[in-house]
Image (cartoon, rainbow, N blue to C red):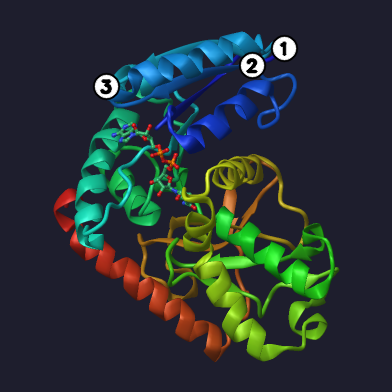
Amino acid sequence: MKDPITISITGAAGNIGYALLFRIASGSVFGPDQPVNLNLIEIEPALPALEGVVMELDDCAFPLLNSIVATADLNAGFRDADWALLVGSVPRKAGMERNDLLGINGKIFTGQGRAIASNAKPTCRTLVVGNPCNTNCLIAMANASGMPKNQFFAMTRLDENRAKSQLAKKAGVHPSQVTNLCIWGNHSATQYPDFTNAKIDGRPVTEVITDREWLEGEFITTVQQRGAAIIKARGASSAASAANAALDTVVSLITPTPEGDWHSVAVASDGSYGIEEGIITSMPIKTNADGSWEVVQGVPVNDFSQGKIDATVAELKEEREAVKDLIPG
Ligand code: NAX
């Protein structure tokens, strides 16, 4: 048996948290020989509900679950973390402007970024799920003084999975046959699911699906609006599929990417593809055999794609401007 690793999860009593914790504790993310410590972080009013979740975790008697901490204290919550999954945030309420949400949630991520830097392992990787996740990630990263920027990620994997599923349905194939699907930009309605480089069984999607109008129109808007469609149908936002995507992200970042493929996750831009350095933007990423990751270079960007990427990057810059007070010089 390996030494336990510590996974800190904020918003652990929420819907995504509920769909996330049991899979981590069962070993289906870090492997059947990897014990885990779960550090569950919530705000004070949610601690009683969190206690119920802890009781359920106890009742599973998971062989790989080494310890559980349930706390509202960020220092205790992020202590010795190997992974910080930042799920908790305040949902947008009626009448709230996007900038209000940015301000309210942004403040959460300054404190969490600082607490990660002070308490987590220096190698800790942070994945932000709570929305607006790209900009929240930027805030956490900027406040986590001393932590390398390449250890911060924001989740766009749900968008990738949604896009693969839509393409597979249209082509009449299984989603596992769809590869090379990159989400560019922001996890928002401006994101660009890049069908131009995606493949089905190794063939360009554009050869398999010849309905270009659908690809450029309905396909993109369906992926962009999928979150809203789920809320409309379910009366609640995506939870199980979001948790699944968070775990897919972690697995893809600790497992070498199959040769020639890539996965989508938002990272601090290094200037690749002309995207301003430091912006947290989704890009094509591959994980190397030594566990490091890099931006896949040379993915063709045609004029259509460039227009879409420019629009979503422009939105990210606006969001950064709106929270500039939360980003230390
Ligand atoms: P819930 O409202 O069910 O749960 C959120 C939990 O976070 C609550 O238990 C709350 O007490 C806790 N929380 C709030 N502020 C906190 C803080 N400062 N520290 C610790 N915990 C705190 O929401 P849920 O459905 O679980 O969604 C969580 C977040 O994921 C939301 O921001 C949501 O918008 C976002 N999503 C992101 C997605 C993505 O693809 N990146 C997709 C799904 C989801 O919409």
Q: Amino acid at mark 3?
A: Glu
- 45 to 164, vertically: above or below: above
Q: Is disc 2 placed on a helix, strand or loop?
A: loop
Q: Answer whether residue 127 is visible to the viewer in this image.
A: yes
The Cα atoms of the two marked residues, 3 and 1, are separated by 35 Å
- Mark 3 Cα within 10 Å, few/some/many (few <14, many 20+)? few
- Which of the two discs, 1 and 2, labels the residue nearer the N terminus? 1
Q: Is disc 1 placed on a helix, strand or loop?
A: loop
Query: Comparing marks 3 and 1, which lies closer to the viewer?
Result: 3
The Cα atoms of the two marked residues, 2 and 3, are separated by 28 Å
The Cα atoms of the two marked residues, 1 and 2, are separated by 8 Å
Q: For this rendering, which residue is in front, 279 or 208?
A: 208
Q: Residue at x 36, y 49 (%)?
A: 137
Q: Is disc 3 placed on a helix, strand or loop?
A: helix
Q: Amino acid at mark 1?
A: Met
Query: Comparing marks 2 and 3, which lies closer to the viewer?
Result: 3
Q: Residue at x 77, y 60 (%)?
A: 175
According to the image, label 3 marks what residue? Answer: 44
Locate residue 288 relative to residue 151 in the image: left or right: right
Q: Answer whether residue 79 is visible to the viewer in this image.
A: no
Q: Residue at x 69, y 24 (%)?
A: 27
- Which of the two discs, 2 and 3, labels the residue nearer the N terminus? 2
According to the image, label 2 marks what residue? Answer: 35
Q: Amino acid at mark 2?
A: Pro
- Which of the two discs, 3 and 1, labels the residue nearer the N terminus? 1
What's the mark number on residue 1? 1
Q: What is the x, y in percent for residue 299?
A: 63, 74
Locate residue 254 relative to residue 38 in the image: left or right: right
Given contact means CB atoms under 8 Å apart, are the residues at marks 1 and 2 in contact? yes
Q: For this rendering, which residue is in front, 6 or 277?
A: 6
